[in-house]
Amino acid sequence: MTLLEQYLEKKKELNYFGHATGLMYWDLETTAPDGAKEKLSDALTYFSTESFKKSTSDEYYNLVTKLAEPEEFEKLDDVMKFDIMRNKRDLDKMRRLPAEVYEESVKVTNKSAIIWPKAKQTNDWSIYKEPLAATIEMTKKVKSYTDPGKDVYDALIDDYEEGMTQDTIDKVFGDLRQELVPLVNKVVAAPQPDSSKFTFKVPAHVQAELCKYIVEYMGMDMNRFAQSETEHPFTTNMNIDDVRITNHYKEHAFIEPLFSAIHEGGHALFEQNVDHKYEGTAGASISYMGLHESQSRFYENILGRNINFWKPIWPKMCEMIPELKEIGIEEFYKEINHVQNSFIRTEADELTYCLHVILRYEIEREIFKGNVTVEDLPKVWNQKMEELLHITPRNDAEGVLQDMHWSDGSFGYFPSYLLGSIYDGMFLEAVEKDLGSIDDILAAGDIKKITAWLKEHIHQYGATRISSEVLDKVCGQELSAKPLIKYFTDKYTKIYNL
């Protein structure tokens, strides 16, 4: 076999391991009974560790290194050139991490991830703080090997949004906060819609059916899609042809799961729409989470909270939820854009959501500066909620325990949500420049035109363009919060008659 053929055989084996561990994680989070989770977690740890060993072995590394040499590299096509460059960079980094430390990190985060739902459901911070502290220390330990000499939190941010730093985030978040806080204060002081109209019961199975209908309407290929239920919604993919989302249905609050489905559907469309030529290569592994969140939040907010998104499918909505006939689409529109200072990030409106992310970013930054301890976290969290949203959580379940991200060691992920929204303001301008008013497109039921535009300009390239490159090629400008600020100001001034 040629050098490339040997590499592709090893790559295929690693992809099989990735598929297997992906299925185990899916099962662990969705249908596995509680009594089976410990053994399943052990199996996941074993296969993850074996995969890590194979992917960082001398044999695999030597193949990558030889293919990265100029004589061999120039023989490769563009897809394989990107794959080799990315793998060489990542291998140089990961081979600095001893296998026993990697195995230890998987065990620590798996334990934390298993305990977190129990702590949240029982509102018991005491059972979670020790596993969380261990996860934080393990994160620092791992980074000391993979990114020696680099600020730990900058390294974590870079893991989720390549090229991004705390300095850049501080600037754009600061610009947004300066304009957003007075706008939120004005909106919250204005007359509010009556949310009590939307507390009627909608059975979980009806919600699940409606969510499937909506993601298909957005452009999802349902032959390559699956949906299940978990405590915290997420998206995962085994490969381009097997993309899955989860949801958490609430019978007396159906709007929340509806928008969770649209959000996760945006993630899933990005994964589905990657060009198949990148299948099994680094080009299909999209780790730029600001860019990924921009796609989920573009569907959720820019499109999903636009009244015209719902006009073409309103008859179907009323057929599945008859109570909506009496309420009407105008009241529904006001409710889905109801701005209020609330406790739960995933249930927040698109305006105050920004403040939820800023809160988490500032706390994470201080954790890794050594200024906030795990013991302090509930108190610090509540102080930040009061400072930014003028409310104090009644308990830890609606405060510091509400998110799953810290339980699996995803520190540095939270900023990507707000970065994604900031990108969206820029993408909205680009879409309308090319296609015209999104109001008109949505009202005509042509949302798939927008999905096709996103596929053409963003999705198809997978991981081959980092976020800053996408902004340059699609928007022709550097990162700026100004377009998002304009979108917010125009929209909510009109809705609330400010």
Image: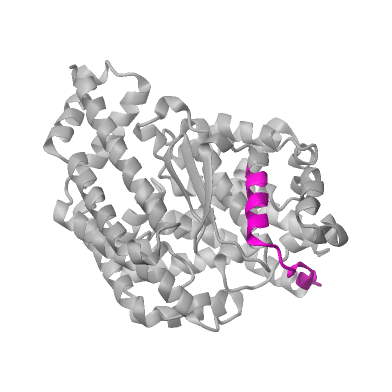
Instruction: Judge whether 271 appears above or below 97 on screen.
Output: above
Foreground residue among 447 and 1 = 1
Q: Is residue 98 visible?
A: no
By secondary structure, the bulk of the magenta-drawn segment is best described as helix
Residue 185 falls inside the magenta stretch? no
Residue 201 falls inside the magenta stretch? yes
Find residue 116 and report its image quarter. Answer: bottom left
Instruction: Judge whether 484 appears above or below 113 on screen.
Output: above
Instruction: Name which residue lies at 37% across and 24% down.
Output: 79
Asked if residue 433 lies left or right of residue 475, the reply is: right
Find residue 249 and report its image quarter. Answer: bottom right
Instruction: Name which residue lies at 26% across and 41% down.
Output: 90
Task: Give x and y (percent) for residue 280.
Answer: 36, 31
Q: In the rendered structure, which segment of residues is drawn in magenta?
A: 191-215
Find residue 406 and report its image quarter. Answer: bottom left
Foreground residue among 347 and 197 = 197
Task: Give x and y (percent) for residue 493.
Answer: 78, 60
Task: Give x and y (percent) for residue 417.
Answer: 51, 55
Task: Give x and y (percent) for residue 464.
Answer: 41, 33
Q: Quadrant of the C terminus?
A: bottom right
Q: Is residue 156 visible?
A: yes
Applied colour scheme: one colour
Q: Residue furthest right?
A: 326
Asked if residue 151 lies left or right of residue 246, the reply is: left
